[in-house]
Image (cartoon, rainbow, N blue to C red):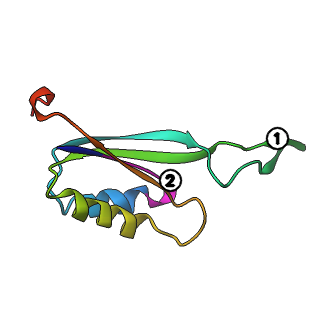
């Protein structure tokens, strides 16, 4: 079993979740996170003052899948999340020990 963790842009979250519905997912979570990558140190204005927006809002989707399904799930996430611009996100794949998972 593998855990696939995708950190994506918030406005692409619904598309990614819809794409994942077509695959066999054993379980998962979705949460709002703040991310830092190549999009760093942008100055923003709020009520006339500037502040640094080093961490940008992202959505983290973590799903548990069987190893044989993982390539299709990763491909679905990449296809649904990609905008072609910097900051599309990251995907991390973590192996899980089946004997500790209670499904």
What quarter of the picture does the C terminus occupy? top left
Q: Is residue 101 left or right of residue 77?
A: left
What residue is disc 2 on? Answer: 10
Residue 72 lies in what quarter of the image? Answer: bottom left
Kindly state the secondary structure of the residue where label 1 is placed.
strand
Crowding at mark 1 (Cα within 10 Å: few <14, some 14-19, many 20+): few
Residue closest to the far right: 48
Q: Residue at x 62, y 45 (%)?
A: 36
User: In the picture shown, does residue 51 fall above or below 16?
Assistant: above
What residue is disc 1 on? Answer: 51
Residue 85 lies in what quarter of the image? Answer: bottom right
The image shows residue 65 at horizontal and vertical percentages of 19, 48
Q: Is residue 18 left or right of residue 35?
A: left
What quarter of the picture does the N terminus occupy? top left
The mark found on residue 96 in the picture is none
The image shows residue 68 at horizontal and vertical percentages of 14, 57
Magenta highlight range: 4-12
Q: Residue at x 38, y 58 (%)?
A: 14
Does the magenta-highlighted stretch encompass residue 50? no
């Amino acid at each position: 079993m593998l855990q696939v963790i995708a950190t994506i842009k918030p406005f692409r979250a619904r598309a990614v979740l819809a794409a994942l519905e077509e695959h066999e997912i054993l379980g998962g979570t979705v949460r709002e996170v703040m991310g830092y990558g190549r999009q760093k140190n942008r100055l923003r204005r709020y009520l006339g003052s500037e502040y640094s927006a080093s961490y940008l809002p992202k959505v983290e989707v973590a799903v548990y899948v069987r190893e044989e399904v993982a390539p299709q799930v990763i491909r679905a996430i990449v296809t649904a999340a990609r905008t072609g611009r910097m900051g599309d996100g990251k995907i991390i794949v973590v192996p899980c020990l089946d004997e500790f998972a209670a499904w």
